[in-house]
Image (tube, grey):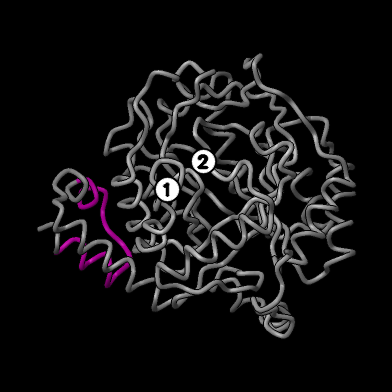
Amino acid sequence: MVKEIIDKLYLENNGTKEELNFLLDNLTDEDKKYLIQKAHETRMKTYGDKVYLRGLIEFTNYCKRNCVYCGIRRSNKNADRYRLTLEDIEECIDIGDRLGYKTYVLQGGEDDYYTDERMIEIIKMIKRKYPNNAITLSLGERSYESYKKMFEAGADRYLLRHETATKELYEKLHPGASFENRQQCLQNLKEIGYQVGAGFMVGLPGQTNKDLVNDLIFVKELEPAMVGLGPFIPHKDTPLKDEKGGSLEMTTTMLALVRLLLPDVLLPATTALGSIDPTGREKGIKAGGNVVMPNLSPTSVRDKYSLYDGKICTGDEAAECRNCIEGRINRAGFKVEITRGDNIAWRGKNKDIFAKDVDKKIRTENIFLR
């Protein structure tokens, strides 16, 4: 029965809530291998063996939220706070350009210091220097007007993990936050025209298979351009410090299911996966992942952006991080693709932009900093 459900997901890219619940409740080791195989076949049909790189810049660890799992939560008095200046960010993207990156991900806590005006200044600086490169923002919840202003300034994508599609669990993990507003923000971003990324954590305390199925149904209905999912990893300075973390096994299962439900989706193999298993990112790629995000942040701040304990790549220089990840991707049997790496369905609707991307494609030879 489980194999039949996997076959249906592979052929129809859809499944009922009941089927997905049955699959998760009854998945054997053999079934898991078959699921991974079908997810891999699906990614090969849509994206081939390409893995897209995004240069990650973690530009502030100040946050007004108090999410109970997060190391940069407002109440963590042990966090060593920092903010990057416009000049700091410019230096990061210049290094990224020399390394061949065509997408920059600006990620931070919900920090009111970065007003619309400051963000617009940053976005315009990047687009002025590198007009054909893509900018992904990950700044949390903001107003419709704020999202629109940043989009009009040149931002292309926005990553806002929904974290969990179960209202009760969401509100337990996010004191003072609104489940409905989180989901409304995602709808607003889609309406404005961003390539939108949603996502969730796997292995949260109290999370059940039914909760994970809610996440799968939610992303299927939302149809985001990207889904960022990774294991829950506890942080020593949070209320969940003594909880058990999420497993590689369940995380790769969820990656594979998302790939089958959304064949065109961009699906990162996250740093968190590599943090719980030495080959976690490679296993994520083999389960249908096709994006990795090497760190471009200054080494002086990397360990300060501590969302969870045991984060890898906090001391590597940008070029070292880039070389390491490309080597891992190649050894896993895949190839790094140096383009903007837009969602394939979005490309079809925006052929002129995609043509420029292909025309300006930079190959990997001789682009690394020594």
The answer to whether marks 2 and 1 mark residues whose Cβ atoms lie closer than 8 Å is: yes
Q: Quarter of the image holding residue 49? A: bottom left
Secondary element under disc 1, as helix, strand or loop, is helix
Is 98 on the left or on the right of 253, as rendered? right
Instruction: Give the label, 2 or 1, closer to the camera.
Output: 2
Residue 266 is a magenta residue: no
Q: Amino acid at mark 2?
A: His
Label 1 crowd (10 A; few <14 / some 14-19 / many >=20): some
The mark that comes first in sequence, 2 or 1, is 2
Position in image of residue 126 (x %, y %): 84, 59
Q: Quarter of the image holding residue 294? A: bottom right
Q: Residue at x 33, y 58 (%)?
A: 256
Position in image of residue 356 (x %, y %): 74, 81
As drawn, the residue found furthest toward the front would be 370
Secondary element under disc 2, as helix, strand or loop, is loop
Residue 10 is a magenta residue: yes
Foreground residue, 303 or 348?
303
Q: Residue at x 36, y 57 (%)?
A: 283
Please state the extent of the stretch shown in magenta in the rendering: 4-21
Position in image of residue 97 (x %, y %): 77, 65
Labels in figure, total: 2
Q: Residue at x 45, y 19 (%)?
A: 241
161 over 292 or under it: above or below: above
Q: Which mark is residue 218?
A: 1
Q: Which mark is residue 162?
A: 2
Q: Amino acid at mark 1?
A: Phe
Q: Residue at x 68, y 33 (%)?
A: 109
